[in-house]
Image: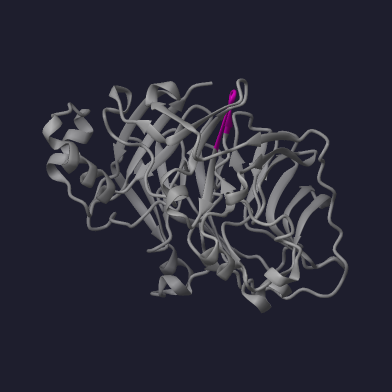
Amino acid sequence: MRSYILHTLLVVVAILLVVNNSQGQESPVDTSTIRTLRIDPTTASGGNMSQVFDEINFIPLETTKESVFGDIGQLEVTESLFIVFDHDTKCILLFDRKGKYKTKIDVGKVIGGRLSPEDIDVYGFELYKKSSDYMIEIRTASNVYVFDTNAKQIDHYNRNSNAHISTQEYIFKDSVKLVSYYQNKKSEDKALYGYALLKNTQVLGKYFEIDTGKYSKTGDFAVGGPSFIETDNPEVLHAVRYYDYNIYQITSKGISIAYTLVFPSTNTIPYDFNRNKKYLGKKLDYFFKNPENIFGIGYTYQIGKYLYVKCGSLSANIRRNGSFVYDLENDYLISLNRLDPDSLSHHLPVIGRWDNDFKKYDGQYLYASLSSLELFSYHEQVRMKGYNYPAAMQNYFKNGDKKDNPVIIQLKPKK
């Protein structure tokens, strides 16, 4: 399950799927239990790491000739492994829980030889448990490749025989399956949907029809995409959408709006931004002209009484101060960017650049990452203070450099 929700890179949506003109059959979203949260980035409180977290650990990922990569686009965690997808190299890398490199899957070689990463239409992987091991599933538009955690390919099949296509899958306890980017090729309704709920061959609900023709013709600016965000309840997921300040709750029964975020007017897009034709094909230009406006939210993990959320904007102010944790019990907003490193974080930062945030919640810990460039730059600034780092980080700073692999940060949130 992919924990990333908001890619704050500028991308042009060009979904090369052909749809007919049949009327979509979108299922209604429940709006009966919405809670409104007011988020003002300028007034959010700071503090210390220990106000929000109970435990923080740093795990450098081993850097070798074989294991070097750029950034963690997707992170999955098992009892014994960190599994990383790197968008730049289109590789899936496996490390043990101490960060030692184990093996990798070169997606380009798997799907057709030495292709340029730009030619590979793969943006992540699916992970699921089978017997005593986990299976890693790589999906292209027409094929599925299955590997074990030793990077051994154990299956390969064509997707064209499937009744439907989808990108991600999540199975609830009652065997209802949630999928994203759903399209049924054998149905009269061939529209593309952000999400669908399925039970065996029955479609229980289809949500958020995507007008592929409109987007492909106008090249609208967009960020992120349909994804699943973990909460502290495995039967409840969160989801977000483009240009939308709602946090959606997904269960096997359907989709509802759990929270709607209200920002100051200076940070808010027009109410009709998604409907008014004057913005079609001009969204990118709009955000360059209005950089303070928040174009979306993401990383909306709900853990106990706390709701984590990230705001996306082209504004330097929001980039520096756009990650928050909201105390739902006391209606209190804390800026994660304004938390000072302390003894709990071993005097190291935990939140990095503006397009990076928490990548996974495994039911106990949140996981983030920082680049070696960020950590070594910080270390040089505070070197004279003589902080006593954990052994793994002492070795990292002594023997590594700014070009090393990222460091995973494991954080136990307060509940």
Q: Residue at x 61, y 43 (%)?
A: 263
Q: Residue at x 77, y 73 (%)?
A: 19
Choose between 242 and 205: the one closer to the eye.
Answer: 242
Q: Which residue ends up furthest to the bottom in the rendered image?
A: 217
Q: Which residues are magenta?
A: 302-308
- Where does the image place residue 229, in percent across and percent down from the top left? 59, 42
Choose between 41 and 75: the one closer to the eye.
Answer: 41
Q: Which residue ends up furthest to the front in the rendered image?
A: 266
Q: Main secondary structure of the magenta part?
A: strand
Q: Is residue 223 magenta?
A: no
Q: Residue at x 37, y 54 (%)?
A: 71
Give the number of callouts.
0
- Where does the image place residue 126, in percent across and percent down from the top left? 55, 51
Q: In the figure, 35 relative to 27: above or below?
A: above
Viewer can see residue 189: yes
Q: In the figure, 179 relative to 232: above or below?
A: below
Q: Image quadrant for the C terminus?
A: top right
Choose between 83 and 393: the one closer to the eye.
Answer: 393
- Where does the image place residue 293, in percent across and percent down from the top left? 57, 54
Q: Image quadrant for the N terminus?
A: top right
